[in-house]
Image (cartoon, grey):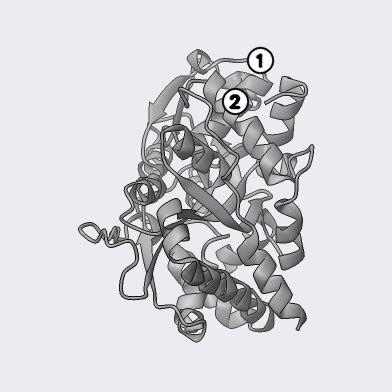
Amino acid sequence: MRRSFITSVALFLVGLTLTVSCANPASTIKTNTGQGSTDGGAAGRARLGYSAWPGWFPWKVAEDQKFFAANNVPVELKWFDGYLESINTLTAQQIDANSQTLNDTVSSLAGGADQVVVLVNDNSTGNDKIIVREGINTIADLKGKKVAAEEGAVDHFLLLLGLKKEGMSPSDIQFVPLETGKAAAAFVGGQVDAVAVFAPFTTQALKRPGSKELFSSKDFPGAIPDHLVVSRKFLNEHPDRIQSMVNSWFATLDYIQKNSTQAIDIMAKRAGVTVAEYQDYAKGTKIFTLEENLKAFQPGNDMSSLSYAAAQMADFLQEVGLAKQKPDLSKMFDDRFVKAYAAKAKT
């Protein structure tokens, strides 16, 4: 994780936002895990997981507008109200693909999973925040305070990065491990002093009187890339279905650009927020274009390159104890599906 470790940390430190009250529909919808279905995408279908994040809500638009069917693949879109549960379900191969962050995918590989990044959905540019109560004004002020986040997931990872940048260690705070929705509720209820969550939970967290954003991902571009991740087994057995999902994603982005009012209404409803609240998320998430996807998969020496970013994250995860060993990243990325779409788009 180094050229200079501190420089690298500064580049991709992110303050993950805070927590959400139980009143947010996005935190109370029942999880559909597909448990008991372990057929690896039989009968021509693909089981795709996603959870509450603005960069992944376009999948709901794809479903509503029947882009999956148009691209010749029946997709079972599975909603998870707990993000970490979606990661665990992919690892257990109870779904074939999932929407998850780069660092969480690196962590899964370190734990023995065999997963592949095939598409970049977005980069967080402000929708990840650290939200704090009144009286906390700097990262140093977190010392001795109760800070909630989902242990082992992206919020926790970014909280640790923030502490590292300030020269602090995990022992400097009272860490409270809670699922994201519960962490949000705990913050709004005054049970913790700060919380690390992501949109749409940020909207609810900031409803606590006197609360405010301490820092966000807008200050650290490239820190949190989000992806379509598939199991190696599914990739080897059904590359055609992965291609169809990638094609459907780009068709969805075209639809959103041309039909923004209808698309935002669909995504806001899925997020459990108002249209006005959802529109506020636009500047906090950078959806990747086809060209930006192609560039991200190329080798590089900064955080805009996925291979570089993954190596930095692997080192950091091991250093802070979230990974016992450094994973093999040599087969983590497969850009053939994005390239195939690009070639088709030019014809």
Q: Is residue 69 above or below residue 286?
A: below
Q: Is residue 16 above or below residue 193?
A: below
SS of the residue at dot 2? Answer: helix
Q: Residue furthest front?
A: 236
Residue positioned 53% across, 23% down in the render? 318
Q: Nearer the viewer, residue 151 or 208?
A: 151
The amino acid sitting under disc 1 is Gly
The amino acid sitting under disc 2 is Phe
Residue 47: where, in percent of width, then height? Answer: 37, 65
Residue 193: where, in percent of width, then height? Answer: 47, 29
Q: Is residue 134 visible?
A: no
Task: Tell me the tag on residue 138.
Answer: none
Numbered marks: total: 2
Q: Earlier in the sequence, mark 2 or mark 1?
A: 1
Q: Is residue 317 visible?
A: yes
Decide if residue 217 is on the left or right side of residue 82: right
The residue that disc 1 covers is 167
Classify the position of the C terminus by image quarter: bottom right
> Mark 2 packing: few (<14 Cα in 10 Å), some, or many (20+)?
many
Residue positioned 38% across, 43% down in the render? 185
